Amino acid sequence: MKWIVGLGNPGSNYAKTRHNIGFMALDRLADRHNISVTQNKCKALIGEGNIGGVKTVLIKPMTYMNLSGESVRAYMDFYKVNLEDLIVVYDDMDTEIGKVRLRYQGSAGGHNGIKSIIQHTGTQQFNRVRMGISRPDPGHAIVDYVLSTFMKKEKEALEQTIEQTCDALEYSLTNTFEQTMAKFNG
């Protein structure tokens, strides 16, 4: 079984913001495979299904971004799952919009959701898909930027990022993460 955690903030006022691109990707993946992400467990919304013959659980923490690790830890402890089977999907300012970067370890890089997961799992070694949201213009506050919505001119690149993320996630379920990185990091 694989488990995929998309990071974001709960609530309709955050739904279309840059910080919620992880939720957007999970919603698209769920739509592709008729998975309903509506069970309220482990401080998250959870949906279980079958993707490419692999039992897959999609998880959207409802703790707000900076406490995402609480939900990940609760799920790990309750279901006795392995970190090797986890993929975390989240926004990344150091990746250009329209692109994704896959990694299997590393620091939080200033991302509070990843910082929380590292804190609650005690390791930096877990698979990640970093979805590009680009950096704000100089002088624009980071917090305002990540909580802002995408501009109309970014719509095509946003769609590309979401589709590429879903393609990478599907591929990763039946291939090693190293193979997935080789294919999708370009």
Image: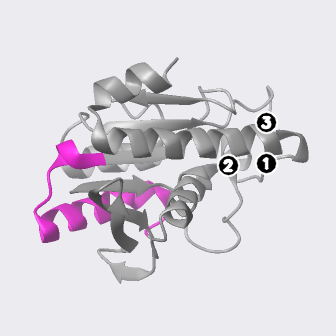
Judging by the rendered image, the residue that carries numbered circle 3 is 140
Residue 114, percent from left and from top? 39, 44
Q: Residue 49 got which mark?
A: none
Q: Position of residue 164 (x, y in %)?
A: 58, 38
Query: Which is more N-terminal, label 2 or label 3?
Result: 2
In front of the other: 45 or 3: 3
Q: Quadrant of residue 135?
A: top right
SS at circle 3: loop
Q: Is residue 157 left or right of residue 71?
A: right
Q: From the viewer's side, name the closer residue of 63 and 89.
A: 89
> Which residue is located at x 39 percent, y 55 percent?
5
Q: Earlier in the sequence, mark 1 or mark 3?
A: 3
Residue at (31% x, 45% y) in the render: 173
- Tell me: 80 left or right of 95: left
Residue neighbourhood size for the residue with mark 3, other residues' Cα within 10 Å, grouped as few (<14), some (14–19), many (≥20): few
Q: Quadrant of residue 57?
A: bottom left
Viewer-side residue, 145 vs 103: 103
Mark 1 near mark 3, Cβ–Cβ under 8 Å? Answer: no
- Name the kind of residue labelled 2 in the image: Arg
- Can residue 148 be seen from the camera position used here? yes
Which portion, as a residue range, is magenta? 63-86
Q: Is residue 7 above or below residue 110?
A: below
Separation of residues labelled 2 and 1 (CA atoms): 6 Å
Q: Is residue 9 above or below residue 91?
A: below
Q: Residues within 10 Å of mark 2 (few under 14, many from 20)?
A: many
Q: Quadrant of the N terminus?
A: bottom left
The answer to whether one can see residue 105 in this image is no
Amino acid type, label 1: Phe
Alpha-carbon span between mark 3 and mark 2:
14 Å
Identify which amino acid the numbered label 3 is placed on: His
Residues tagged 2 and 1 counted as in contact (Cβ below 8 A) = yes
